[in-house]
Image: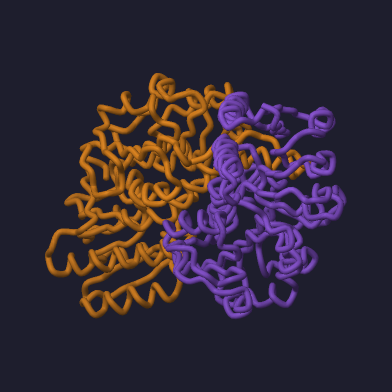
Chain colours: A purple, B orange
Amino acid sequence: LSRKLIVVIPALEEALRLRIRAEAESMGFETLFFDREEDALPALGEAEILFSHFSSLPARGPALRWVCTPFAGVDDFLAPGVFLSPEPMLSNSSGAYGTTIAEHIVMTALELLRRQMEYAEIVRRREWVRTLPVRSLRGSRITLLGTGDIGQEAALRLRAFLPRSLTGVSRSGKNPGNFFDRVLPVRDLDVVLPETDLLVISLPATAETRGLLDAERLDLLPDQAVLINVGRGSVLDARALESRLRAGRLSAALDVFPREPLPPDSSLWTCPNLLITPHVAGNLNLPYTRERIVELFLEDLENYRCGRPLARRVDLRRGY
Amino acid sequence: LSRKLIVVIPALEEALRLRIRAEAESMGFETLFFDREEDALPALGEAEILFSHFSSLPARGPALRWVCTPFAGVDDFLAPGVFLSPEPMLSNSSGAYGTTIAEHIVMTALELLRRQMEYAEIVRRREWVRTLPVRSLRGSRITLLGTGDIGQEAALRLRAFLPRSLTGVSRSGKNPGNFFDRVLPVRDLDVVLPETDLLVISLPATAETRGLLDAERLDLLPDQAVLINVGRGSVLDARALESRLRAGRLSAALDVFPREPLPPDSSLWTCPNLLITPHVAGNLNLPYTRERIVELFLEDLENYRCGRPLARRVDLRRGY
């Protein structure tokens, strides 16, 4: 067992660590677990595989041939200097987050449509106000910008609420199955925004997606449209969105921000018509998600061992 | 047009009033609309039909042959003295609220499972805490106590979240379609409660349902179970529930209470693990609900005119 696998994912419970160890050993890999980056450094020198979201680690592993992150987004790994040369392969855990993020999407959409933040204020004041007009997902026109695992799982659940339409928008415009009524390429975004009551953004942070939702595109949305961002903060112009939220023209649920943590002096904290969550839609807080990242990693470990292509390999130039 | 229909539903918008007027007139009924109970009294003396939720009105209409309430619950109409003798028929608007209440159910279930109230507090303090363990509807065992329109519409939506099981419980135990994996009679409730991660109660307030969820039955639920009540407050022992919420054994979303408005000095206002809404899950605040109550009323108006049984007639002794 001279081939070494290093795992640095503090959130992993013992049962999942045992599972990784057992399967990796059966494939001929010695497995070492660390909870802190600095503790992993000595062992990293001879490691062949790293399973971790800490982007500081790959540069400390000159023998690394494969790095797998337990997250779906890989933007932290795209900065210069993250990898030594020759570059190891990078893979992600895309496919582990659809369930938890889809639940976040449905929850926050309903919270905004049903004015749950205002009712929370009413209840905090011990008042009994029952007359705020609410809206429904039923009959709504939903656009999912991003048609990967997250967009698909969201669409599966949103369909049960009987929307008028479920439109996917992706780079390719290819329809990945029966999740969406139709899938359009991103160049048609300006056509679909005016027909969108609920816009769900699950795009990765890439050069292509940066600033995609700028002021002009936000203004294409109909009045009172609802926007949910679970992708990356760089996709939308937060300042332009904030002014439209303050004017009451749009409402939004943001789980991701251009700078995280959201700085304490950010004006977004007190922005009306905005539901903030601290990047938890797809975090490792759900047991099912942690099981899935381990299952997906072990699938690709088997691929790696057999010399097959990794199922979730990331194209470093494309960024996902 | 000597047959008079009186409508006293302040929330109805003009377009729906025009629709009622047009269809009722075509069936030979003169229609009068009022927004305040007292304004309706003079006309009520000769009215044959009353469409209103105000239970004070039927006793002022000696010629009434049919009273339709725009609500689903009829408990206000079951008190002695509501109706003169001979009693008019009573019908409700069961079937209008499934959509809006099902959305409330999914939203509050996810808010509790994903600890959204705690995250709201974290965000209020401008903190960036991302580590609260959360739970999922996926793989959960869901029991719907009440298998009518509300239970069915909730089940349709909950199924899309891939629960392990969807069990209905009703008085008869009859399965009303493909909404549930199985439907059990209420005498089997004690068997199903220990296997219930999420309990949704949509029962009417009747002598049979009063106090059904008492302390002993609450204790049959597994630790950390989630309870949602959108039916009537009389169904559960609020004091027993409160002590279990305060102990952190259960969490709950209550939209209905034994006394409404919930009194300002109620200890429930500050109870942890409790999401309170002021009886708005199925109020008339959603345009779709208002459309449906008018459609359902007009269906039964046609039934009435033709001498056919009313589709939503209430059995006053049974209470729904």
Residue at coordinates 19% horizontally, 59% vertically from top-left?
A: B310
* Residue B170 placement (x, y as % from top left): 27, 38
Residue at coordinates 24% horizontally, 53% vertically from top-left?
A: B90
Q: Is residue B121 above or below residue B273?
A: below
B57 left or right of A106 in image: left
Q: Quadrant of residue B319?
A: top left
In the foreground, B316 or A196: A196
Residue at coordinates 44% horizontally, 55% vertically from top-left?
A: B100
Q: Is residue A287 above or below residue B45?
A: above
B16 left or right of A171 in image: left
> Which quadrant, please, contains the N terminus of chain B?
bottom left
Residue at coordinates 70% horizontally, 50% vertically from top-left?
A: A90
Q: Is residue A204 visible?
A: yes
In the foreground, A301 or A291: A301
* Residue A136 placement (x, y as % from top left): 49, 61
Q: Is residue B275 visible?
A: no
In the foreground, A283 or B15: A283
* Residue A146 placement (x, y as % from top left): 60, 63
* Residue A16 placement (x, y as % from top left): 59, 29
In the foreground, A217 or B312: A217
> Which quadrant, please, contains the C terminus of chain B?
top left
Q: Is residue A101 above or below residue B132?
A: below
B263 left or right of B49 in image: right
Q: Count of labels shown?
A: 0
